[in-house]
Amino acid sequence: MEKLTSVKLINHACFSFEYKGESVLVDPWFKGAIFNNSWRLVDEGGDVPDNLKYIFITHEHPDHLHWPTLKALADKKITICIPKRQNSNVKDNLKKLGYKVVEFYHGVKKNLKWLEAEYFNTGHDNAIVFKTKDLVMLNQNDCYLQQHVCHNIINRYPHIDIWWMQFSLAGYYGNQDHVKALQNAQKLHENHYASYKEIFNPVISIPFASFVYFCREENKELNKYRVPLTTIYENNPGTQVLYKGDEVMFGDSKSRSMKNILKWESHFRETLPMENPKGTVNELKSVITEFANKYGATGSISFELYDSEKYCNIDFDRREVDCEEPSNPIAKVTLFDLTEMFKNPWGADTMNITSCFKVYDEGRWKALLGSVDSLYVR
């Protein structure tokens, strides 16, 4: 079997491969806190392959589309491949960095010299199939593909050599004192890995895109519920565990996989740095005024706070924020996260992924996040 040269895990959701002296990099993120400073890599760093020609981005989340990393890698000789979006902001900003940009329509294959690639979409996320002369790789990352999309992939690519898949928690599943909900989330990710592996039946399965820890006081409880690599490895024959910098092995990988599980587990057990971002009432007032003026927001909403100020009431009609005790707060949050949510067009999605909150009124909380998120065109 002809195989790609140096198919490597770089870090988290990033991997690279080489063919005929040219390199491809996927979803690079090498260091720094993301999602409102609520996630960090358990082991920072990553080696960029030589003669880099293409960077593929699966979707817009910062553990896949990480602007500081892309800025550091920027070179006019590199082409970045992205899924077609309604909003041109990602394409425009990549061009400003100096990249050439190629957009892919979902389900439409493109030929890039020696490489064929095709994006498959569910929701805001995308999987990518890479195909060379004699090898097929499916990068599913954290895309929970719908059944009809899975069948479409199987029909087009009945034999998959290498399959890359997320294996652990990545957002809000319930309040952090809801033990049963978090245990169910853990089991859900175990089942996702196993069920998709059964569907695609790859020769080699690689768990990745979960080499992070939750790095704030408000979400650190989630670290207790991460899915152990041992569970994934032992329950899914054909799985190969890579450490950053490792190449995929096309032979017996058991000994190295066991060593790599111990390496990753040792990092997860370390006392890792925590983040403590701060916001202020005055910052939030300014952002709320701008948000209400831009979108014509009306009504009011109240929160309990983790901050020194105990409460926060937002009145969109008056463009006011006060810290009086409310009768019915919908959630407990931080001033920093509230400010970020209303300041950035993607802020509601980010807020949800941080899991740095406690929900009191699920219906109103979901309605708030849904309303704010609907304002962002992807």
Image (cartoon, helix red, strand yellow):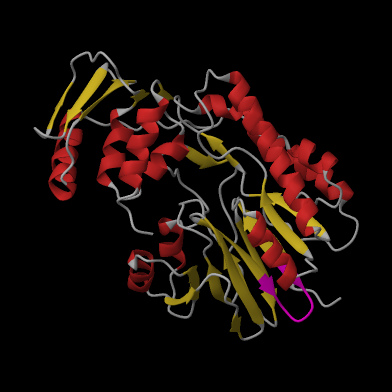
178 left or right of 162?
Answer: left
- In the rendered image, the vertical position of residue 206 relative to residue 326, given as above or below: below
| Number of numbered markers | 0
Q: Looking at the rendering, which quadrant does residue 342 occupy?
A: top left
Q: Nearer the viewer, residue 295 or 274?
A: 295
Quick one: which residue is furthest to the bottom in this view? Answer: 113
Q: Looking at the rendering, which quadrant does residue 318 occupy?
A: top left
Q: Nearer the viewer, residue 318 or 344?
A: 318
279 left or right of 12?
Answer: left
- In the rendered image, the vertical position of residue 57 relative to residue 323, given as above or below: below
User: Which residue does the image show at 64% across and 39% down from the upper left?
Assistant: 168
Quick one: which residue is furthest to the front in this view? Answer: 148
344 left or right of 218?
Answer: left
**Residue 360 image offset from top left, x and y in percent:** 40, 20
User: Which residue does the image show at 89% across and 61% down from the upper left?
Assistant: 251
**Residue 157 image offset from top left, x and y in percent:** 74, 71
Residue extent of the magenta highlight: 130-137
